[in-house]
């Protein structure tokens, strides 16, 4: 289906339609530093009907700076020089906030070397940013409303602005703060400004408490619940909860089949169940595509992915004139960008290789202690691999994540979408290795060739209780990963943060009593606040600043890796889907608690899908066809797994299964294309309405163009030459000409 417009791909292509926000006439509200309890609330309440909560504070910019000169820093060699540098940085930030007409006030932080810049936006800058966003949405085909009646368009736009959700307001203010100065923003970013540690919105405690109370009493999450999340946290967070809820419902099918297979075929593989899981995985991914498309239309973000927002961090090597808008834009040669992409691959490969070594070491240690070791302390050493998995693997994964983030930043991505795709793929590689590498080694290396290890054990006098290797070993490995992984995830996401939240304040107080050292900055601001309500609010700000950033990548990785266990390995242990179903019911509520209580409030970004994660899931579905074919042959009772022809027949089974996957996917897509979707109907309706409105406007202009103003009554204004005048001068009466024609017909019949 073709779009009604060829939409611009970047902000620069339509930014010239409007002057930047910072160049607008200053609003009536001056940029000042009001008291939270007095000036801010009253001022905001009289200027905007889309007032945010939290005393009108939209964002907190955490400004962290060193108070002592760092050794090895050649640019700053003294404390006065460092103080001057920090002061200049703060002044630069406040100047840029002033330029875009944002209010702000600077408060001391809870820790030494920390300032909190509390930012609030009057209605003027938000309206300007809102206007630019609506134009961009119209050009991209995101929204095509407000076009039917031009006489009421202003009233419709005003009403739409007054109906802004909390997420939309915060997103607009975030755009003003972070987008480049050339685009009309303040250009403030943690990657650009040296001492800006983070930019964070504050939690709405009233909403959070109502949200958690509502979900604690429900078995299923409705579309209305998801809409509330979208209105408060933005589409990106809402899509995650929509995905996990849809995935939870779809898991009921393999969970029921898996339970049946486990009760009837507990120690054998079932071919029909493997085929059913492959069909289920294909159906789920294809139906989720349709679901997220419907949500994009329902939430008003269809085609938003076409908006390629330039990252504030992208400065380019030089400024060049844009061929479309004629404006100066940052530029980096394509060869250099391509070179950086290619050069980062060895860095990712090295990180993945080192992570694979760690995973392989933990796997071999577990294998040795469980299968072969029969020496002293065996009952205690038996749990060593589990401890290593819990402590070592997450630590190494975290180091890898930080490393690939540095590489992704170094690649100089021009847009946020490009950066996110590259970073997501790198993160997926790491978690793929952690989640599946040992299972693949067990299935394709250890089980076929494990019995060849026994002679070496005898040769080195290693006592063991090793038995014949079969697929039950792979099942035990899978149970270990599924159950342990879910328990570790629950502990790290829920139990550990709760314990730290309880223990750390008490430990901090005890430490201060022991050292008898009170930080001057910790209570300075609160001591100077006479109003108890304001002091209580600042305590809330300090607590939220101390929280960690919410990382949506971690939650997506957990669900996608679990989907891989279900789609690729359920044939080995049919109860995998049952465990996933139970885990996800807890997970969706646990993630809600995590967002509300244990992490900072996420910035409400827009999105029209779950992004690259869907492609990663489709890759896992393809891999499930490979595991299905290989397991069906390798673990069949009639297969001689130690035969020299086993590798060849295994490859043939994989080839057959992979072709079956291609055929099934094509059939499912063809079948679903025949099923009508209300989203497609709504899109066609919107496009028809849009074309009709513009056609009516065009026809109106065309009528004015074709109307003749000279000699309209007799229509002879175009008779300019002598011959045409001679021929037409006596034949301009249409009624006479018609009667003359009838007379000719009568004469013709009389003569015959």
Image: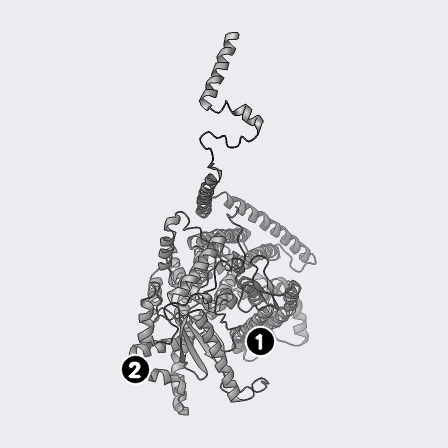
Figure quadrant of residue 346: bottom right
Q: Position of residue 13 (x, y in %)?
A: 54, 58
Q: Residue at the spot x=51%, y=24% of the render?
A: 729
Q: Is residue 37 left or right of residue 173?
A: left
Q: Is residue 461 left or right of residue 84?
A: right
Q: Residue at the spot x=46%, y=56% of the render?
A: 135
Q: Position of residue 679 (x, y in %)?
A: 45, 48
Up-down relation of residue 202 to residue 735 (above or below): below
Which of 40/65 is in front? 40
Q: Is residue 397 left or right of residue 701?
A: right
Q: Position of residue 304 (x, y in %)?
A: 49, 56
Q: Position of residue 108 (x, y in %)?
A: 41, 81
Which of 325/613 is in front? 325
Distance from Cα at disc 1 to Cα at disc 2: 70 Å
**How dense is the environment of label 1, judged by Cα within 10 Å: few (below 14), some, or many (20 and up)?**
some
Q: Which residue is mark 2?
A: 530
């Amino acid at each position: 289906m073709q779009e009604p417009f060829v939409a611009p791909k970047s902000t620069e292509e339509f930014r010239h339609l409007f002057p930047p926000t910072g160049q607008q006439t200053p609003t009536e509200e001056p940029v000042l530093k009001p008291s939270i309890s007095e000036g801010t609330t009253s001022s905001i309440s009289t200027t905007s009907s889309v007032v945010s909560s939290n005393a009108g504070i939209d964002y907190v910019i955490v400004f962290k700076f060193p108070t002592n000169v760092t050794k090895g820093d050649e640019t700053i060699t003294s404390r006065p020089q460092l103080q001057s540098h920090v002061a200049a940085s703060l002044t630069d930030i406040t100047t840029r906030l002033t330029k875009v007409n944002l209010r702000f006030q600077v408060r001391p932080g809870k820790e030494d070397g920390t300032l909190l810049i509390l930012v609030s936006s009057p209605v003027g800058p938000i309206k300007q940013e809102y206007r630019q966003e609506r134009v961009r949405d119209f050009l991209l085909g995101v929204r095509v409303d407000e076009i039917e009646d031009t006489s009421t368009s202003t009233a419709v736009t005003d009403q739409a602005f007054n109906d802004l959700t909390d997420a939309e307001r915060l997103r607009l203010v975030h755009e003003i703060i972070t987008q480049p100065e050339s685009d009309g923003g303040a250009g403030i970013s943690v990657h650009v400004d040296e001492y800006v540690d983070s930019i964070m919105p504050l939690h709405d405690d009233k909403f959070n408490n109502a949200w958690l109370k509502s979900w604690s009493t429900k078995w299923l999450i409705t579309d209305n619940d998801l809409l509330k999340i979208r209105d408060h946290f933005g589409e990106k967070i809402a899509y995650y909860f929509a995905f996990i809820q849809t995935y939870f419902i779809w898991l009921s099918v393999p969970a029921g089949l898996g339970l049946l297979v486990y009760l009837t075929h507990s120690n054998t593989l079932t071919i029909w169940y493997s085929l059913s899981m492959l069909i289920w995985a294909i159906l789920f991914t294809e139906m989720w595509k349709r679901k997220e498309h419907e949500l994009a239309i329902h939430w008003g973000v269809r085609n938003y992915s076409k908006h390629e927002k330039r990252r504030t961090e992208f400065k380019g090597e030089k400024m060049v004139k844009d061929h479309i808008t004629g404006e100066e834009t940052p530029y980096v040669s394509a060869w250099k960008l391509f070179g950086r992409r290619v050069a980062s691959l060895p860095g990712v490969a090295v990180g993945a290789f080192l992570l694979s070594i760690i995973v392989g070491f933990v796997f071999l240690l577990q294998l040795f202690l469980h299968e072969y070791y029969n020496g002293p302390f065996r009952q205690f050493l038996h749990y060593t691999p589990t401890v290593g998995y819990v402590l070592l693997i997450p630590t190494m994964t975290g180091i890898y994540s930080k490393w690939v983030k540095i590489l992704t930043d170094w690649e100089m991505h021009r847009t946020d979408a490009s950066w996110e795709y590259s970073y997501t793929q790198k993160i997926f590689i790491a978690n793929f290795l952690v989640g599946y590498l040992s299972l693949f080694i067990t299935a394709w290396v250890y089980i076929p060739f494990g019995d060849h290890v026994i002679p070496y054990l005898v040769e080195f006098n290693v006592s063991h209780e090793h038995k014949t290797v079969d697929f039950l070993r792979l099942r035990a490995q899978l149970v270990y990963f599924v159950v342990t992984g879910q328990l570790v995830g629950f502990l790290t996401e829920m139990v550990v943060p709760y314990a730290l939240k309880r223990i750390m304040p008490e430990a901090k107080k005890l430490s201060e009593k022991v050292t008898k050292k009170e930080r001057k900055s910790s209570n300075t601001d609160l001591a100077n606040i006479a109003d108890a309500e304001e002091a209580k609010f600042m305590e809330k700000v300090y607590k939220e600043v101390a929280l960690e950033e919410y990382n949506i990548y971690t939650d997506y990785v957990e669900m996608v890796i679990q989907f891989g266990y279900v789609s690729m390995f359920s044939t080995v242990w049919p109860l995998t889907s049952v465990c996933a179903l139970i885990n996800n019911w807890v997970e969706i509520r646990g993630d809600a608690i995590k967002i509300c209580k244990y992490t900072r409030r996420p910035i409400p970004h827009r999105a029209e899908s779950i992004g690259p994660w869907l492609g990663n899931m489709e890759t896992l579905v393809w891999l499930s066809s490979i595991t299905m074919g290989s397991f069906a042959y390798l673990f069949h009772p009639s297969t001689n797994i130690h035969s020299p022809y086993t590798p060849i027949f295994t490859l043939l089974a994989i080839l057959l299964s992979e072709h079956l996957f291609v055929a099934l996917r094509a059939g499912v897509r063809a079948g679903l294309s025949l099923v009508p979707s209300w989203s497609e109907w709504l899109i066609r309706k919107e496009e028809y309405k849009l074309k009709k409105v513009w056609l009516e406007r065009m026809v109106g202009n065309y009528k004015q163009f074709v109307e003749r103003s000279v000699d309209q009554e007799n229509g002879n204004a175009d008779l300019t030459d002598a011959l045409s005048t001679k021929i037409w001068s006596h034949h301009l009466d249409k009624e006479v000409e018609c009667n003359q024609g009838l007379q000719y017909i009568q004469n013709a019949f009389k003569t015959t």
